[in-house]
Amino acid sequence: MNTRATIAANRFGLGARPGDLEAIGNQAESWLLDQLQGPTRPASPIANLPDSASVLNEVFKAREMQREAKKKAADGVAVNKEYAAKVRRLYLEQVLARFSNAAQSDYPFHERLVHFWSNHFAVSADKQPIPAVAGIFEKEAIRANLGGSFAELLLVVEKHPAMILYLDNQRSAGPNAEIVKRANRRKRPQKIGLNENLAREILELHTLGVDGGYRQSDVTAFAKVLTGWSVGGGKGRFNQGVPGRFRFRQELHEPTSQVVMGRRYQQFGVDQGEAVLRDLAVDPKTADHIATKLVRHFVADQPPADMVESISKTFQRSGGDLPAVHRALVEAAQPWQSVLAKYKSPEDFIISAYRAFRFVPRDVRALFRTMEQLGQPTYRPGSPAGWPDTAGHWGGADALYKRIEWANLASEYASRVSNPLDVGNQVLGAAFGEDTRKAVSRAESLVQGTTLLLVSADFQRR
């Protein structure tokens, strides 16, 4: 069995489909490198999603109807139900598109990179109106920008309305901003002020990392830099810009120079925030942080220090060129040394099972329930930190029991379309251990054999 083909399809990719290992053959490395730019256009489940501006405009109108209904003592219950149904429909469409695309993709390494970066720049659908745009954010900000530099990706992400709304930056105002001064002159109570959420998460999670050497003063200064980064549309004085699109609101911006990480930024307006982001994007601490996360994801829960250093140097030498960094992952020796190095997250498990049995999900409500039961509801990590990437979080007796329950149900279908022994040989290849092979072959039925395959240590790891 070709070990490198197995690793390419199952760890770098999303799980092999029958025929994939044979097609990869002895060209595992080139098979992966050919995917770095991804498909020339998104697959239909993704391409058919609406754009975030139109969705947010629709959502904003629905929320305004909610407010008006409350003011007029109208039937607020009916309006609330209508709003909730609209948002849930949009959310479920995006969940189904993500899994349908992953199940069928001929570019599974590129697709895994999309999922990795989407989790790195996590927004959570636990907060309104993010359920309506979480998958669209992934399409517009992440999927479309993996062929360039980290700086370019960072700028697009932080300007995306989903990120701004998720971290409450749309009305963040500096203490000397025009709108605050006007309120002070009129002696009106201030309903807006400085919000540090976006600045803090950019420093702590998106760039330098929690040990990146920044201080509270840097967070505050950076938050002032980002004042005015907002979303178009609204009422009254906020009725400016294209609804649902990025809008720089000068009246909210702190009109002074700021010192962030020891560097003074004299620019004014949106240029100031862009300048800080470009500097953060190429900081050596950012390179170390990104390298550590990538190596943890593709190699081991405890990332080998020598490989982290190597990937970080590639990041720094290339100016954060993402294809160069991703290529360095493939060309390193460490990912190819162990065939079963990473425990699958629930999402990895479900997608790899779909691919193994060539199943394309259609019942999105059943899929949604499955992901909730397995503890990884789609686009809902619960915090800007995203989902953990280690076995310690996803293991445990209860978590395994829930996977077994799902495998039992799935096997009723899967056993009707494929023989589990054949599937194991075709999708696990070198990772299909002799003990698992014997257990599957001795099963009392195809259903039982399929369940044993899906819950085996061989299939649960990548």
Image: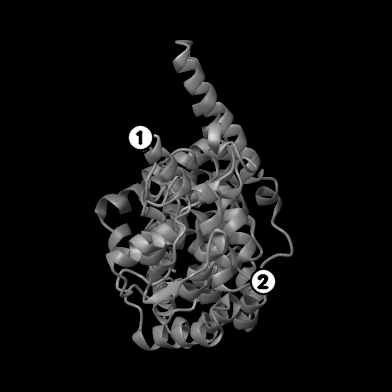
Residue 270, x across and y down, in percent:
55, 60
Residue 297, x across and y down, in percent:
42, 70
For the C terminus, the quadrant is bottom left
Q: Is residue 429 left or right of residue 285?
A: right
Q: Is residue 381 above or below residue 424?
A: above
Say whether residue 92 is visible: yes
For the N terminus, the quadrant is bottom right
Say whether residue 112 is visible: no
Tag 2: amino acid: Gln
Instruction: Residue at 49% x, 22% y: name it.
Output: 66
Where, by quadrant of the figure, is residue 321 drawn? bottom right
Instruction: Residue at 51% x, 76% y: name it.
Output: 7
Circle 1 residue: 187
SS under mark 2: loop
10 Å crowding of disc 2: few (<14), some (14-19), many (20+): some
Where, by quadrant of the figure, is residue 459 drawn? bottom left
Q: Is residue 338 above or below residue 437?
A: below
Residue 161, x across and y down, in percent:
54, 48
Is residue 402 or residue 199 the one in the foreground? Answer: 199
Residue 199, x across and y down, in percent:
40, 59
**Rounded to the nearest whole Å, what is the CA distance between mark 2 and mark 1?**
55 Å
Tag 1: amino acid: Lys
Is residue 49 or residue 405 the one in the foreground? Answer: 49
Q: Is residue 58 above or below residue 389?
A: above
Outermost residue to the right: 40
10 Å crowding of disc 1: few (<14), some (14-19), many (20+): few
Is residue 347 or residue 445 the one in the foreground? Answer: 347
Circle 2 residue: 37
Q: Is residue 24 left or right of residue 276?
A: right
